[in-house]
Amino acid sequence: MTFLRLELHNHTTESDASITCAELLDYMAENKVDGFALTDHNTISGHRKMAALLKDCPAPVQCIYGMEYTTYYGHILCLNLSEYVPWDSIDSGNPELIFRQIRGTGALAGIAHPFSFGYPFATGCRFEMHMTDYSAVDFIEIFNNPEPLRAVNLPALALWESLVLEGVSIAATSGMDLHNRAPFEGRYATFIQDMGIPVSEALTEAIRSGQTWVSKGPLLTARTLPGERRTVFEIQDGKKAGCPVDPGK
């Protein structure tokens, strides 16, 4: 089994970052990322620019086109977004409406850093919409690397775990929330199984089936052996810099 390493939350000068589309692409290629998402705040203006750059990029890196809806009540991360869906009429009491509109375009819709600090530090960053039907959500960003572990990321992980245990089909992802050339070593990334198809398609399959891995490198897999009535657990190497896996363990 082989895996693809994805970085699913990144910004450029098309919104509030200090790196251009070209610089983001170069940085992802330098770090041997298999696929990365372009998720600028409230704009898809960089999509066409990145597509043009990829035509001349020699590295085997693919872009997942998306956007981060930055609202007054929380951030919604969109992946494989091909068209802009206006959110000016968003209803914090009925957020399922905008999630279903996003998914109606064929895109994936998830909650970014749900427990990020809100008022008075960063109004709108914390997810404060009153979600009653989580089946409208494809994924939750359980680890946003710049955010503090205990105050923000562990509550997000706990939320995702509680929903899964309740029977909700919802995937887990992570993101660098990249705004500059921040180092990848020692940070969480999202991994999916390499299906031999374009990364964007593989991501959709992985998220909709709940088969994503969030890790700094080691990946736990399980396979059943019905004839022997047992399950074999193995540690796979995600081949991520800064977190090598000891094959002898």
Image (cartoon, grey):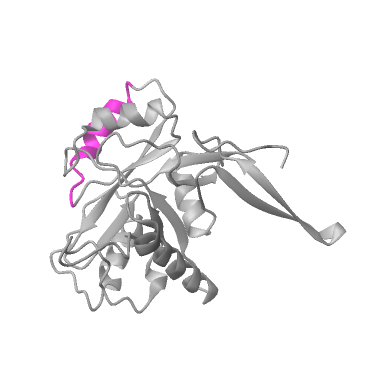
Q: For this view, does 235 lie left or right of residue 230?
A: left
Residue 23 against residue 74 in the figure, above or below: above
In-front residue for pair 102/217:
217
Quarter of the rendering occupied by the C terminus = top right
Q: In this view, does 55 lie above or below 221?
A: above
Residue 247, percent across and down? 69, 37
Is 118 or 28 nearer to us in this picture?
Answer: 118
Task: Say if the magenta span includes residue 32.
Answer: no
Seen from the viewer's position, the closer of residues 24 and 126 is 126
The quarter of the picture where residue 12 lies is: top left
Q: At which x and y percent is residue 77?
A: 31, 55
Q: In which quarter of the image is the N terminus?
A: top right
Magenta range is 42-56
Relative image position of residue 136 (x, y in whole percent): 37, 69
Q: Which residue is drawn at 18% across and 48% down?
A: 43
Residue 53 falls within the magenta-colored stretch: yes
Q: In this view, does 146 lie above or below 34?
A: below
Q: Residue at x 18, y 41 (%)?
A: 45
Taking the spot 16% from the left edge, 44% from the top edge, the residue there is: 16
